[in-house]
Amino acid sequence: MNPVGRNLGMLLMIATMAATTFAGEIQIAWDSVPGAAGYHVYYGVQSGVYGSFVPAATNSATITGLQDCQAYYIAVKAFNGAGESPNFSNELSGWSHPTVESVTPSSAMQGDQIVIDLVGANFLPGAAVELGNPNVNL
């Protein structure tokens, strides 16, 4: 077995789908594998079934062109000159953010009670809105 195949079990998938995640994309990062020349980041809409992959030269990748709010399952294989590892990493699942077209009002004075209108597409039923500001209470 090549060194990449032996070390792939150490691969740790970490979702980095925070403020840097945009509509239609998922960003991920993982621990580097010694001896790897690069990685193939596989993804699909069913657990364990990966229909596509994106290449990555380092231990992070952005998968783009995804349907908003669709669950995706992601796993990584390392490769080097001897070939691709036969084993997938642990699987990660996630979904890209919905598309937000507008938010009104865009500002308010401290102490004001306001109603926020959020217009967009592909929101899941029951989805929560996170404003990303610790000083704002919903």
Image (cartoon, rainbow, N blue to C red):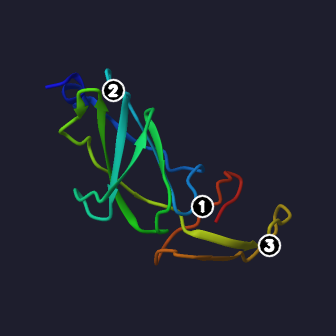
Q: Which residue is mark 1?
A: 130
Residue at left offset 36%, top offset 27%:
37
Q: Which SS class for mark 3? A: loop
**Picture quarter with the N terminus:** top left
Secondary structure of the residue carrying numbered label 1: loop
Residue that numbered label 2 is attached to:
36
Q: Which circle's residue, 2 or 3, is located before the other in the chain?
A: 2
Q: Residue furthest front?
A: 81
The C terminus: image quadrant:
bottom right
Residue 51 against residue 69 in the figure, above or below:
above
Instruction: Kindly identify the amino acid type of the residue bearing the numbered disc 1.
Output: Glu
Task: Evaluate if marks 2 and 1 touch, with contact meaning CB atoms under 8 Å apart.
Answer: no
> Residue 3 sits in which quadrant?
top left
Q: Which label number is shown at residue 105?
A: 3
Q: Residue at x 18, y 26 (%)?
A: 6
Q: Residue at x 59, y 49 (%)?
A: 20
Q: Position of residue 46 (x, y in %)?
A: 27, 64
Look at label 2 and name its amino acid: Ala
Badge 1: few (under 14), some or many (20 or more) residues near its Cα, within 10 Å?
Answer: few
Between the C-alphas of marks 3 and 1, the distance is 16 Å
